[in-house]
Image (spheres, rainbow, N blue to C red):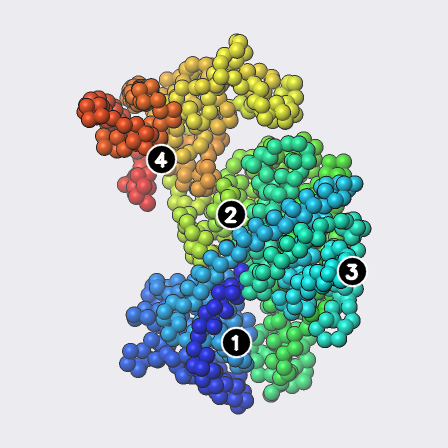
Amino acid sequence: MALFQNSVLKKYLGAEDQLLVKEAFSAYQKYFHHPQVRENIRAAKEEQFQEGFLRELFVNILGYTINPEPDYNLTTELKNIKDSKKTDGAILKDGTALAVIELKGTDTKDLDKIRDQAFSYKNNQPNCIYVITSNFEKLRFYIDNAVDFVEFNILGMQLEEFRLFWLLLHKENLMAGLPKKIKEQSLVAEEQVTKKLYADYSSFKQELWQDMVRLNPGIDELDLYKKSQKLLDRFLFIFFAEDKGLLPPNSIMEIVNQWLELKDLDAYIPLYDRFKLYFGYLNTGRIKPGKAEIHAYNGGLFAADPILDTLLISDQLIEKHVRKLTEYDFESEVDTNILGHIFEHSLNDIENVRAKLAGEEVDKSKTKRKRDGVFYTPKYITKYIVDNTLGRLCTEKRTELGIIDEEFAEGKRGKQKKTILKLKEKLDAYRIWLLQLTICDPACGSGAFLNQVLEFLMAEHRYVDELEAQLFDTPLILPNVENHILENNIFGVDINEESVEIARLSLWLRTAKKGRKLSSLNSNIKVGNSLIDDPSVAGDLAFDWQAQFPQVFAKGGFDVVVGNPPYVQSHSLDEKSKNFIYSAYKTAEYQINTYAVFMERILKILSDTSLYSVIIPNYWLSTQNDSKLRIQIFLENECIEVLNVFSVFEDATVDTVILTGKKTLDIKFPKSTKVVAIKKDYKLISERLSAISDKLWETNQVFLFESINDEIKISFEKKLELDGNFLVEDYFEGYQGMKTYEQGKGTPPQTREMMNERVYHSLSKIDDTYLPLIGAGNVQRYLIKPFHEYIKYGPNLAAPRKEEIFIKPRLLVNRILSKEKIDITYEEHPLVNNTDVFNFLPKHGKEEFVKPILAILASKICSTYFRKSNVNLSRAAFPKLNVNNLMSFPIPALNEEKRKFLTASVDSILKMNQSLFELVESLVDLMKAKFSIDKPSTKLQNWPYLDFKGFLGELKKAKVKLSLAEEAEWMVYFNEQKAKAQALQADMNRIDKEIDALVYELYGLTEEEIRIVEGGL
């Protein structure tokens, strides 16, 4: 959204003292609109007018008191707290900076250039909320972060603009925190409107489709559903266009009222026919005097549609829903970004429809949104990515052409004609270059990145216009470049037809102007499978990039690629698609995830030396199966920056990095990559937003690569270096557990129905082919919890392993690292495990090392090592161990004395932990039998951590009432059992500490390293 929601803003603007505002505006006009004053300001150097600017604007107009006056709240040159740098000015509250002010002269046209500097000052002032930047002509006002701002024309504000300026910057309002309050209320209002509009939109769409199906029985129901989407898009455009002044106001309701009048006059025609007539006007135009004139806006949205234009639709249904949508103010309440959120949620709707038509139930865990990896990208992410690719490219081009703002500042005065023409040639060359850029999002969704690119390019053209107007001392006349940008600079592809429709609509709504035809986006934003170009695999969605965008590939490919590629795992792809990807993409290894394949596709569609930036999961930085991708990204091409932003997307259990790089043909070394990260523990989106926009990096380092054979390891935390004479792989063979189901795998080949019904699982041992089955939930530290399932073991499974893995004495490792230490234990009985458990079988002659190494791997040092050296474990969402990394864990030399001590320690803990588990379960079973509690609460299941009062409280929640005598009896028994549990736990803790102390000694850890392990650093 913009910085403020218009409906919220209108409320606060209306509450202002209008007489006071007009008086202030008169004072402002008298000074800043004076022709000679304007001319002098434009000619002044930065230092000449800084104090004067603060005094004339902030003191005389906005009511501040400047230093050295008594009780001043405005000062010049405020020093940073952490260093000696100074901001040009600051607004103070209680002696500390509430807002920092950074000023430049009018020769600085691009205020983005001073944004980072201004925010570096803000970050040095702990209570600072606002940032103000100005070049004396324009002023930008930021709240909290650098993503959104309000810009004011200081030398040309009219009353309406001044009213907002006064609301935000007048002393009383700023000191009272009003701007931040308006922003916070805007966020709440947008969320409420989004939810309500989605509910109304979804209801309209669902009822419209059902009505279409009922009245048009000869047409495919799925086709009708897609037509309902298109009709809704038409209505949405009209609603936006009405409220933005592009169409006659209230035209929708006028059509409804005319239809009602015709009905009363016995001249009935269907309401939909009346709307079709209006759609025709929007396609070809309507010449009428005054406001009734309609210009031809069609860019494909209102073109004739043989199916949609012949459908029958109920009058009452259309009337009911357009009345409801008319109630929204699409100018002040509804931002076009809201459409993206609506689209994100509505993707599930079409999945439900498809399932319904196929007579299937909807698996909510595999809805279209999740299956296609669709998550709407927040504005602060799209802005960062576009600024660091397209913005970087533009900066480099301006530098190459020698475009310097200061050279244009004084207009024609004192310049030779030759100099003026040379400057004009630079601007012309830059504009021509801008007009030829090609930027693509290969998984564009509802257009979040495409809209950000549009916004950036429009601003860049305005910047060129401003320089040219200043050079020739002429008024600024902005050309209509939006259509050119849409038709020539922006490209997108998405596999979802619905998303492409929304993307086109959102771009039209951003650029539509009265009297100007909409751009046709059918040639630039297309439906297709970006990864597969073979029709025998992808059908109509097969997408040949060269054939679809010949004008782009005639010059070698795209100049910039940005996006948020979908995160779709291998099991969600059909066999044809998987086989195609394995054969067509060299980085595809083992288990496919589409974001990795998209990275290879992106490098293929880029022109040489062009830039890309994407947001993708971060675990590819360390997993063995992505080694080829890392080589391609870091070594074969140039990776400029890796930014770990951790959790960004709502509902997506994945942590992410923003990856920015360049396609290169020449493999030259050394190469360097900047690796940065925000704090991992940010919980609020606002915290992450500020950290990214203000570049508040928790990690900031540079990785150097010297050759193509370099090993690539990237960590976002302080490393723990361990030296060992050996590795785990010197003692063990490591195996992942078996995989039970995958469509098309196994003998006979498994079907979707077999998978859904889990045909090879059983709660009992049916015959000798059925073996006990355990998973991650069964494997705990020094303990195997009882199993409750069997699996029919053999070639029928998707990926069975040799049976000896599950029979011989071995270590079992839970790959999900959910606790402080690794869940690992010793087992010698036949048990089959799934892929969430690793099996470590001792090599021949190494059996005596099994329990000593178990002690090391179960110690605190091992989990700390992996958390601080494996990016995969620095994720908040389901951190997992990697079998290859475990096998390469260093093991120190272990003499016989140390082996015996560790073996005895492990035997003791295994025995005590089993006793503790049986003790705990015994009381739980007693409660279940005695009190008929089917599912005891988590706290009851972990009763040793309760006192007796807490125990009684949990029983009460379970609707168990004890008499006083029963309470007394239970208190004695509970305290006896708790004492036994505490004694066992205390003994295990003591042995654990003895093991940790010995392990620290074996690795020769320093005091600082021990503090790292113990959590002190």
Q: Give the residue drawn at x 52%, y 76%.
A: 161
Q: Which mark is residue 97?
A: none
> What residue lies at 76% left-to-right and 41% top-to-bottom?
217
Which label sits on residue 649? Answer: 2
Locate residue 968, reporting x and y percent.
18, 24
Tag nearer the camera, 2 or 3? 3
**Chain-order first, disc 4 or disc 1:** 1
Residue holding disc 3? 267
At label 3, the amino acid type is: Ala
Please tell me which of labels 3 and 4 falls first in the chain. Answer: 3
Write down the quadrant of residue 60 in the picture.
bottom left
Residue 519 position in % (x across, y down): 73, 62
Q: Which mark, residue 161?
A: 1
* Circle 4 or circle 2, nearest the eye: 2
Return the residue nearer the eye: 948 or 489.
Answer: 948
Q: Nearer the viewer, mark 4 or mark 1?
A: 1
Numbered badge on residue 820 = 4
First along the sequence among labels 1 and 3:
1
Q: Of discs 1 and 3, which sits in the foreground?
A: 3
Q: Which residue appears at 57% of the width and 50% of the height? A: 199
Q: Position of residue 252 (x, y in %)?
A: 67, 62
Between the C-alphas of marks 3 and 4, the distance is 78 Å
